[in-house]
Amino acid sequence: MQAVVPAAGEGTRLRPLTAEQPKGLVEVAGKPLLTHVFETLAALGVESIVVVVGYRGEDIRTYYGSSFEGISLEYATQDERLGLAHAVLQAAPHVDGEFLLMNGDNVFDADLSPVVERHRTTGADATTLVERVPRERARAGGVFDIEGGEVVGVVEKPEEPPSQLIPRGVYAFSPAIFPACRLVTPGHTGEYELSDAVDLLIRAGRRVETVEFEGWCCNVNTPADRERVAAHFESL
């Protein structure tokens, strides 16, 4: 299976660490942030990775080259950071068949194989790792609407969340996600949201599955997040 890793952002909240290097190369717990991501994907048996680069993307290309621990690396460029659905479309020419998508700033200490297994056994067009969070946090982003154990929609930043399940930054997709991403219209921020593309799949009658997250994860956005990751791995 292939994987797509969006890693185009500037990482402004990590400044000054990202003033002269991309976020993906910032050292976290003794290794670059993207190395954590690639190692997680390697454990899932991924054979090739498409890295979507933008800010100081050439630095990432130079650092990793064409392979990582035997996994083939390709690169796509996202010149304008217009959201995850837009990033997926930049990777589309390099993807052939089913693929995983993992955000380039998440550090996991968890077994993510249930996402791959659920995707393969159900024949879903999208399988999403989800996390159960407090209702206040569920108002801040995409939330899954579940009825009778089935996903019936995705709602972006709802005042009254239909559930407490939010995406955790790991997805398995069929190629059906690409036309869905092309149909997405930008939100009030000007970004093309991946959650909107998943919602379009649901509305088209496509099968969407969720796997509830078990384990530890940190989305690295700030110096405090770096410290949290370091403390976690030092405690093991």
Image (tube, rainbow, N blue to C red):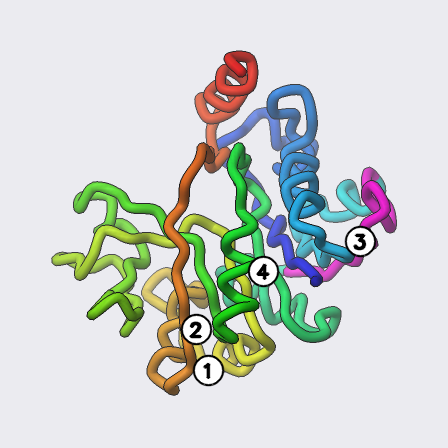
Q: Which span is picked out in magenta?
A: 63-78
| Disc 1 residue type (three-letter) | Leu
Q: CA distance from mark 1 to mark 4?
A: 18 Å
Q: CA distance from mark 1 to mark 2?
A: 7 Å
- Mark 2 or mark 3: whose residue is earlier in sequence: 3
Is residue 77 one of those drawn in magenta? yes
Q: Nearer the viewer, mark 1 or mark 3?
A: 3
| Label 1 close to label 2 by CB (< 8 Å) | yes
Residue shown at 54% from the left, 35% from the top: 107
Disc number for residue 197: 2
| Disc 2 residue type (three-letter) | Ala
Q: Residues within 10 Å of mark 1 (few under 14, many from 20)?
A: few
Place of residue 153 in the rendered image (x, y in percent of width and height, measured from the top left): 29, 72
Residue shown at 62% from the left, 49% from the top: 7
Q: Nearer the viewer, mark 4 or mark 2?
A: 2
SS of the residue at dot 2?
helix
Residue hosting label 1 = 183
- Mark 4 or mark 2: whose residue is earlier in sequence: 4
Residue 192, by quadrant, is bottom left
Q: Nearer the viewer, mark 3 or mark 4?
A: 3
| Disc 4 residue type (three-letter) | Glu
